[in-house]
Image (spheres, rainbow, N blue to C red):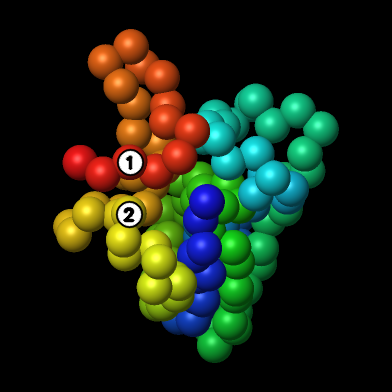
């Protein structure tokens, strides 16, 4: 359902102290609902340590997050470019993020099984 690829150009060091991105490996196979940390089951969490100038690439459906940094001088910048298939724009309304369409819920709190328009 999510044809998005994200490319990150790392502008600063990313480590545990400075705020690094964590990925839930294999989570792209379970994109019907968002996971909360602690619900990952047997899926491994992979932490990326990067240096300025490193390039990262990931599939948009892979759960990822950046926990709060622990260093008092933390500050991490990344320039992200996102690439989507043209068909994406047929079901993601202008001004919305694709997650708005994927995880939209009805009045009962049920998520749609396919993208819907607003």
Count of numbered badges drawn on the protein: 2
Q: Position of residue 66 (x, y in %)?
A: 50, 51
In the foreground, 49 or 84: 84
Q: Residues within 10 Å of mark 1 (few under 14, many from 20)?
A: some
Residue furthest to the top in view is: 108
Q: Residues within 10 Å of mark 2 (few under 14, many from 20)?
A: some
Q: Quadrant of residue 89?
A: bottom left
What whole-number distance in Å separates the C-alpha atoms at marks 1 and 2? 7 Å
Answer left or right for 112 relative to 63.
left
Q: Is residue 80 visible?
A: no
Residue furthest to the bottom in view is: 53
Q: Quadrant of residue 77?
A: bottom left
The residue sitting at 39% across, 63% down in the picture is: 88
Identify the disc placed on residue 116.
1
Q: Position of residue 42 (x, y in %)?
A: 81, 32
Residue 41 versus residue 8 in the image, above or below: above
The secondary structure type at the circle numbered 2 is helix
Answer left or right for 93 relative to 116.
left
The residue sitting at 66% across, 67% down in the picture is: 49
Q: Position of residue 13 (x, y in %)?
A: 54, 73
Q: In the rendered view of the protein, which quadrant contains the C terminus? A: top left
Report if the CB atoms under discs 1 and 2 are less than 8 Å apart: yes
Residue 69 versus residue 114 in the image, above or below: below
The residue sitting at 60% across, 73% down in the picture is: 57
In the foreground, 74 or 37: 37
Residue 102 versus residue 97 in the image, above or below: above
Q: Is residue 58 visible?
A: yes
The residue sitting at 52% across, 51% down in the picture is: 1
The secondary structure type at the circle numbered 1 is loop
Q: Position of residue 34 (x, y in %)?
A: 51, 34
Q: Which residue is mark 2?
A: 91
Q: Earlier in the sequence, mark 1 or mark 2?
A: 2
């Amino acid at each position: 359902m999510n044809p998005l690829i994200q490319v990150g150009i790392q502008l600063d060091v990313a480590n545990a102290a400075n705020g690094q991105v964590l990925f839930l490996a294999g989570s792209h196979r379970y994109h019907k609902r968002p996971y909360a940390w602690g619900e990952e089951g047997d899926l491994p969490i992979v932490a990326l340590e990067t240096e300025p100038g490193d390039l990262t690439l990931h599939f948009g459906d892979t759960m990822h997050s950046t926990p709060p940094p622990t260093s008092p001088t933390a500050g991490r910048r990344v320039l992200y470019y996102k690439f989507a298939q043209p068909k994406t724009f047929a079901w993601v309304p202008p001004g919305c993020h694709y997650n708005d369409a994927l995880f939209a819920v009805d009045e009962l709190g049920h998520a749609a099984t396919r993208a819907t328009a607003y």
